[in-house]
Image: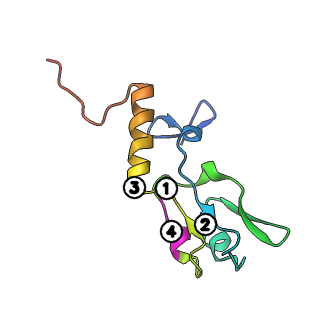
Amino acid sequence: MTKHGIQTYVGIPRNEIAWFPTINLEQCDSCGDCVRHCKHDVFTVVNGKTVVAKPENCVVGCKACGWVCPVGAITYPSKDQLREMLKQARAKYGFSLIQVDKR
């Protein structure tokens, strides 16, 4: 989603959420499965190597490309790391998971 031309995730600027794949280039065999699988244009091939070209296009919480990698070269932050990132971003922007009824 975009807000004022800026990609957001639940109202948080997407560039402030460090959720994106990391490719172990020593392990990657550049088969291209992730490039073909990802519909969000996260990956590209440069000089025969697959790279994360547009990390902010990655859907927050999605690990599908890691699952299709036949050699396990793609990793993501842990669920705990994601929770902490979102918690900090929500606090920064004044969001809360629990809405308190102030009647």
Q: Amino acid at mark 3?
A: Lys
Q: CA distance from mark 1 to mark 4?
A: 13 Å
Q: Position of residue 13 (x, y in %)?
A: 54, 35
Q: Residues within 10 Å of mark 1 (few under 14, many from 20)?
A: some
Q: How is the image coloured?
A: rainbow
Please rate how many residues cluster around mark 4, counting C-alpha atoms within 10 Å: few if below 14, some from 14 to 19, many from 20: few
Magenta residue span = 62-67
Q: Residue at coordinates 70% horizontally, 72% vertically from top-left?
A: 26
Q: Earlier in the sequence, mark 1 or mark 4?
A: 4
Labels 3 and 2 touching (C-beta < 8 A): no
> Disc 1 marks which residue?
77
Q: Secondary structure at mark 2?
A: loop
Residue under label 3: 79
* For the residues bearing labels 2 and 1, Cβ distance under 8 angstroms: no
The residue nearer to you, when weighing 86 against 103, is 86
Q: Is residue 10 above or below residue 76?
A: above
Residue furthest top as drawn? 103
Task: Determine which quarter of the picture holds residue 43.
Answer: bottom right
Q: Earlier in the sequence, mark 4 or mark 3?
A: 4
Give the residue at the far right of this rendering. Answer: 47
Residue at image location 39% in from the left, 29% down from the top? 91
Residue 7's image quarter?
A: top right
Disc ID at residue 64: 4
